Amino acid sequence: MSFTARIAALEPYETWVSMERAGDERFWDGLVLAAGSEPRTTGAVYLFGYAAEMILKVAYFRFTGLAAAQDIAPALRAARTTAHFHRQNLHYLMGWANLLIATRVAAGRPLHPVVAGLLQLHILQLQSHWSEVLRYRAVTAVPAELEEVYNSLDWLRANFRTLWS
Amino acid sequence: MPYRRVVPDETSQHPELVEALGEELRTERADGPEDAPLIVEEVLPRSDYASVRVVWDRWAALPPEERISIILDAYQRIRGSEGVQKISSALGLTRAEAKRLGVAP
């Protein structure tokens, strides 16, 4: 059985539970690339960006009360129609951050403005270095760029529960 | 609406910055000198909350948390508790940071 066939058999559709685990896996994958004796900095930045994207998506799904076993595809399509993703795809990190902030406001449970501001700051920093099209680029990320991406992802990981609870 | 209380630091370590930013908030002028804080309020759709971003070089040496604290203190001073509770997010940047992060005015 091929890997994709095995994935389809084990996880026939995407859930936020599998996405949460995948985000954690991509973080550790990225850390291996970043911390090796010969760091693969662009690869690390690439994976760290996806780890951040998954943290934001899962925080949103968790906050909205999406069931753990539910297929997230309809919720992803619905998110895409909001103003937060105007002319952007679903890899747009600030779209997810602002959707989460606005959804919490609408629900009467806003984030503290300090937390929300720091969230936006870290997303801006991540976005300044990361895009899903990095996979097509051969330029090597310099250590300072990798460090900034890592620090912002570290903040997201440390504050994950605050974002959705 | 659930209760939410945001208490600014009454003993702000940067009262002069709070005062200067508050003055800018009070006047709400459309134009000003280069060294004046630029305040951008983006109202969230279908709400009376706003995301506040302030671009100002005077706080270049301060960490993000202190800049946010100054913003909240200034809003508290000028717009009161009700005004500060309608801030969904607050972010303080310098002009160089805003340019680097793609949010330059």
Image (cartoon, coloured by chain):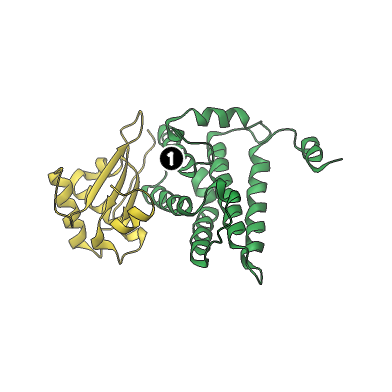
Chain colours: A green, B yellow
**In the picture shown, does residue A84 fall above or below A123?**
above
Based on the displayed image, in which of its 4 quarters is residue B28 positioned? top left
Which is more toward the observer, A142 or B41? A142
Furthest residue in direction front, as rendered: A138
Left or right placement of residue A152 versus residue A68 in this view: left
- Image quarter in which the N terminus of chain B is found: top left
Disc 1 on helix, strand or loop?
A: helix
**In the picture shown, does residue B35 fall above or below B2?**
below
Q: Where is residue A144 in the image (x, y as percent from the top left)?
A: 48, 66
- The kind of residue tagged 1 is Asn
Q: Where is residue B40 in the image (x, y as percent from the top left)?
A: 27, 44
Based on the displayed image, in which of its 4 quarters is residue A42 positioned? bottom right
Q: Position of residue B102 (x, y in %)?
A: 37, 49
Furthest residue in direction bottom, as rendered: A37
Left or right placement of residue A47 versus residue A79 in this view: right
**In the picture shown, does residue B59 fall above or below B74?**
below
Residue B11, visible in the rendered structure: no
Q: Position of residue A20 (x, y in %)?
A: 63, 45
Residue A133, visible in the rendered structure: yes
User: Mark 1 packing: few (<14 Cα in 10 Å), some, or many (20+)?
Assistant: many
Which is more toward the observer, B53 or B86? B53
Q: Which chain carries label 1?
A: A
Circle 1 residue: A98
Which residue appears at 81% of the width and 40% of the height?
A6
